[in-house]
């Protein structure tokens, strides 16, 4: 009887961990422009010391556009650095059902915004909200999981 309880507890623990991992933003995401609806990039989100970071792995460019542009509008150390390979998400930590307290850089305009994110659709979609000051003063993009 104790063996059955042990197996049941182990199976429930595995199911709970699998559900958490599926809802975790860690992985590769296809970013979608909230204004145009076009695919923009692939961003890999990883966890480093309990914080989420997102790095651009690929850009989807129109014919005639520079395939590997530099961030000419970015401030500081990122100025004129390649956008591909650039870390654009930093400092996000789990806060209940979402990740918050971080920042997101928009390489198109060089501006950094406060950021929070949360998964939906069983972890297949990621809502990424960038804002100034308070969350209501911002916009949300929905990214789609690649892997």
Image: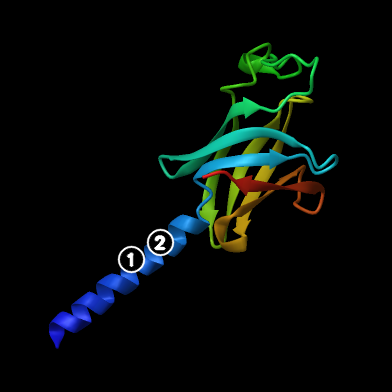
Quadrant where the image shows the N terminus: bottom left
**Residue 30 occupies quadrant:** top right
From the top left corner, tell me how far across and down residue 20 is, in percent. Answer: 45, 61
From the top left corner, tell me how far across and down residue 13 is, in percent. Answer: 32, 69
From the top left corner, tell me how far across and down residue 93 is, in percent. Answer: 52, 48
Judged from this view, the residue extending furthest toward the bottom is 1
Q: Nearer the viewer, residue 68 or 78?
A: 68
Q: Secondary structure at mark 2?
A: helix
Measuring 80% from the left and 47% from the top, which residue is drawn there?
Answer: 138
Judged from this view, the residue extending furthest toward the top is 80
**Residue 69 occupies quadrant:** top right
Q: Secondary structure at mark 1?
A: helix
Judged from this view, the residue extending furthest toward the left is 2
Measuring 63% from the left and 53% from the top, which residue is drawn there?
Answer: 125
Mark 1, residue position: 14
Dot label at residue 63:
none
Q: Is residue 24 left or right of residue 104?
A: left
Mark 2, residue position: 18
Q: Is residue 141 left or right of residue 98?
A: right
């Amino acid at each position: 009887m104790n063996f059955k309880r042990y197996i049941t507890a182990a199976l429930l623990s595995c199911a709970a961990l699998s559900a958490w991992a599926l809802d975790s933003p860690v992985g590769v995401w296809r970013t979608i422009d909230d204004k145009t609806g076009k695919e923009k990039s692939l961003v890999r989100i990883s966890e480093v010391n309990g914080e989420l970071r997102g790095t651009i792995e690929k850009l989807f460019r129109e014919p005639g556009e520079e395939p590997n542009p530099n961030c000419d509008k970015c401030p500081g150390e990122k100025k004129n650095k390649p956008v591909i390979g650039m870390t654009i998400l930093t400092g996000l930590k789990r806060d209940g059902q979402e990740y918050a307290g971080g920042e997101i850089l928009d390489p198109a305009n060089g501006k950094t915004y406060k950021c929070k994110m949360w998964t939906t659709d069983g972890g297949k979609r990621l809502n990424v909200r960038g804002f100034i000051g308070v969350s209501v003063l911002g916009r949300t993009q929905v990214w789609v999981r690649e892997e």
